[in-house]
Amino acid sequence: MTETPNPNIIDADTLTGEMRPIRRTVVSLGSNLGDRFANLQGAVDALADTPDVWVTGVSGVYETDPVGAPEGSDTFLNAVVLFDTTLSASRLVDRALAVEDAFGRERTELNGPRTLDVDLIVVGDRRSNEDWLRLPHPRAAERAFVLQPWYDLEPDAEIPDYGTVAELLAKVGSDGVRRRDDLALELPS
């Protein structure tokens, strides 16, 4: 994994005085089992409750057709969360997995139905090609259910090495992605 944090944005650890870069992070949420909306709201709440994570935006909720899922899979609810953090990518992976586990996520089949999916899309400009973490997320540039909600929050956003979210969304299209204006995720106060 390589990292080139912005040296102009730092946070001092109050106990050790160690300086840690603040990185913009994009996370995609998805659920197609159980109370899908409650699962997404619970994930937003858990991320916002994470020390050294400052949630700055939550997209609208989209209902999406399953992509690469087993036949007969139910539709997903999807959203994107933006936050700033001083946590390392490995700590963010641990947190994402813990949040999924707290909502009963079972990993029995590839792209199988799930109560909750928490995917790191980008962590600053970090790159990783490890088995346990690929950054930027290798399929985010091909997934309208990530691109559309992210575009709504940050129309000028970019996926490092892939291009702007606007250009990628134009290429992929938004078939099978429907905004649910009757559902709105809230940031905890």
Image (cartoon, grey):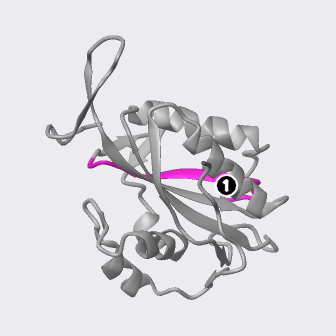
Whether 36 is drawn above or below 60: the answer is above
Nearer to us in this view, 120 or 70: 120
Q: Residue at x 34, y 79 (%)?
A: 166
The image position of residue 71, as x and y in percent, is 78, 73
Is residue 118 shown in magenta? yes
The image position of residue 161, as x and y in percent, is 25, 61
Q: Residue at x 83, y 60 (%)?
A: 35
Is residue 47 shown in magenta? no
Q: Residue at x 40, y 80 (%)?
A: 169
What secondary structure is found at the residue carrying circle 1? loop
Left or right of 92? Residue 21 is: left
How crowded is the residue under tag 1: few (<14 C-alpha within 10 Å), some, or many (20+)? few
Residue corresponding to mark 1 = 110
Whether 133 is drawn above or below 30: the answer is above
Left or right of 129? Residue 116 is: right
Quarter assignment of residue 54: top left
Nearer to us in this view, 33 or 39: 39
* Highlighted range, magenta: 110-125
Left or right of 48? Residue 101 is: right
The image position of residue 186, as x and y in percent, is 63, 59
Q: Residue furthest right?
A: 34
